[in-house]
């Protein structure tokens, strides 16, 4: 059995070699000749999986994004009888940590308490749900918007997007990218929505670039609208708008979910799915793969205030470490 794996999927060779012959290949694009006799293909969201990919069995590890299956033509796969699996939620914790790092940085810079702010979460799935729980555990009010879940009757106090626009001080997007249909999210944040945000609103997009209309956002910022903007994803990628980057408060290169733990979890999830698919189910303990953390335990004495929380979060991840390099590279390119 020949298994192709993206060369940037951590632990993929080690794990999939238990199931067959493994060949690591570039993911953007995958060499056409490598596909001719492949039995299975393990990719990330940088690889477009459309009709030209013809392995017998196709599995996808969508490591960089929670809902990252928009790079795969699932209808064609089903029609062709090709198996498919993804790794939903593999990087959800990482994205939540990214959002927290950004919010704490902005709160310190602008002198506000997060407990005095209302955070509107658009898309309450793997990422949005975890973000809500963490915010509320810290006494931060949240408003939730998730029309598909609301229509299904899922438990939760779901509000309309209009309510979030009117009431939220922070609006953060965590939806899949749907280009059409009842729950279309393409340009969900369009010029009409962005222009109605309250002065000083924090706008965060860490899901898919086209969920926020980048052209409309730039137009509003050029017109002097008072917003704090955090963008990890762009429209289009990788050719992001350099003027927009110059105007946002935090800009990063689609790395919010790009932690070793998140990527490794994606690899293990798709490995377990594929091993079950071929009739040899195997389980992997994630901690047996990962290196020991730099900090095993941190003991606090006294109350956990916002300043202490910021120091703790930034011990783990400081978003400014990824903002500065992108601006440096963009400056050189410009």
Image (cartoon, grey):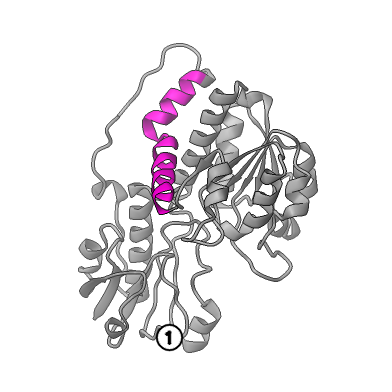
Horizontal and vertical percent position of residue 7: 27, 65
Tell me which residue sits at (41%, 42%) in the image: 322
Tell me if 197 is positioned left or right of 17 in this view.
right
Task: Please provide percent x and percent y for residue 232.
Answer: 51, 49
Q: Which residue is mark 1?
A: 52
Q: Is residue 107 above or below residue 176?
A: above
Over which residues does the magenta segment extend?
Answer: 307-333
Q: Residue at x 39, y 44 (%)?
A: 328
Q: Nearer the viewer, residue 152 or 16?
A: 16
- 202 relative position to 61: left or right: right
- Would you identify the image quadrant in which residue 317 lies? top left
Q: Is residue 188 above or below residue 172?
A: below
Counting the numbered discs, the total is: 1
Mark 1: secondary structure: loop
Q: Quadrant of residue 27?
A: bottom left
Residue at 53 percent across and 68 percent down: it is 70
241 to the left or right of 93: right
| Front residue (pair 151, 4) | 4
Dominant SS type (magenta): helix
Can the viewer see residue 159? no
Residue 251, magenta (yes or no):
no
Q: Nearer the viewer, residue 172 or 284?
A: 172
| Residue pictured at 45% horizontal, 51% vertical | 253
Residue 145: give x, y in percent of width and height.
Answer: 71, 49
> From the viewer's perspective, is 50 left or right of 56?
right
The answer to which image quadrant residue 49 occupies is bottom left
């Amino acid at each position: 059995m020949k298994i192709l794996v993206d060369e940037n999927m951590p632990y993929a060779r080690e794990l999939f070699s238990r199931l067959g012959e493994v060949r690591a290949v570039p993911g953007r694009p995958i060499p056409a000749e490598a596909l001719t006799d492949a039995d299975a293909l393990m990719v990330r969201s940088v690889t477009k999986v459309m009709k030209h990919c013809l392995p017998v069995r196709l599995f996808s590890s969508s490591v960089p994004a929670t809902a990252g299956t928009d790079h795969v033509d699932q209808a064609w796969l089903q029609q062709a009888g090709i198996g498919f699996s993804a790794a939903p939620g593999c990087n959800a914790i990482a994205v939540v940590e990214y959002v927290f790092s950004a919010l704490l940085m902005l709160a310190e810079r602008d002198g506000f308490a997060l407990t005095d702010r209302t955070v509107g979460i658009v898309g309450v799935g793997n990422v949005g749900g975890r973000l809500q729980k963490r915010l509320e555990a810290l006494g931060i009010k949240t408003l939730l918007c998730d029309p598909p879940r609301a229509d299904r009757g899922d438990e939760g106090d779901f509000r309309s997007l209009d309510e979030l626009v009117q009431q939220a001080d922070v609006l953060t997007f965590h939806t899949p990218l749907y280009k059409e249909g009842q729950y279309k999210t393409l340009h969900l944040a369009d010029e009409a929505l962005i222009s109605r945000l309250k002065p000083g609103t924090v706008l965060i997009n860490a899901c898919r670039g086209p969920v926020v209309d980048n052209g409309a956002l730039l137009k509003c910022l050029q017109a002097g609208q008072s917003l704090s903007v955090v963008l990890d994803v762009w429209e289009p990628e990788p050719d992001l708008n350099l003027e927009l980057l110059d105007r946002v408060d935090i800009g990063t290169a689609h790395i919010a979910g790009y932690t070793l733990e998140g990527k490794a979890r994606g690899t293990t999830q798709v490995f377990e799915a594929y091993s079950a698919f071929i009739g040899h189910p195997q389980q992997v303990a994630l901690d047996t793969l990962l290196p020991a953390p730099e900090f095993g335990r941190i003991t606090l004495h006294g109350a956990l205030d916002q300043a202490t929380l910021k120091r703790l979060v930034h011990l783990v991840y400081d978003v400014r470490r990824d903002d500065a390099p992108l601006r440096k590279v963009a400056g050189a390119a410009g």
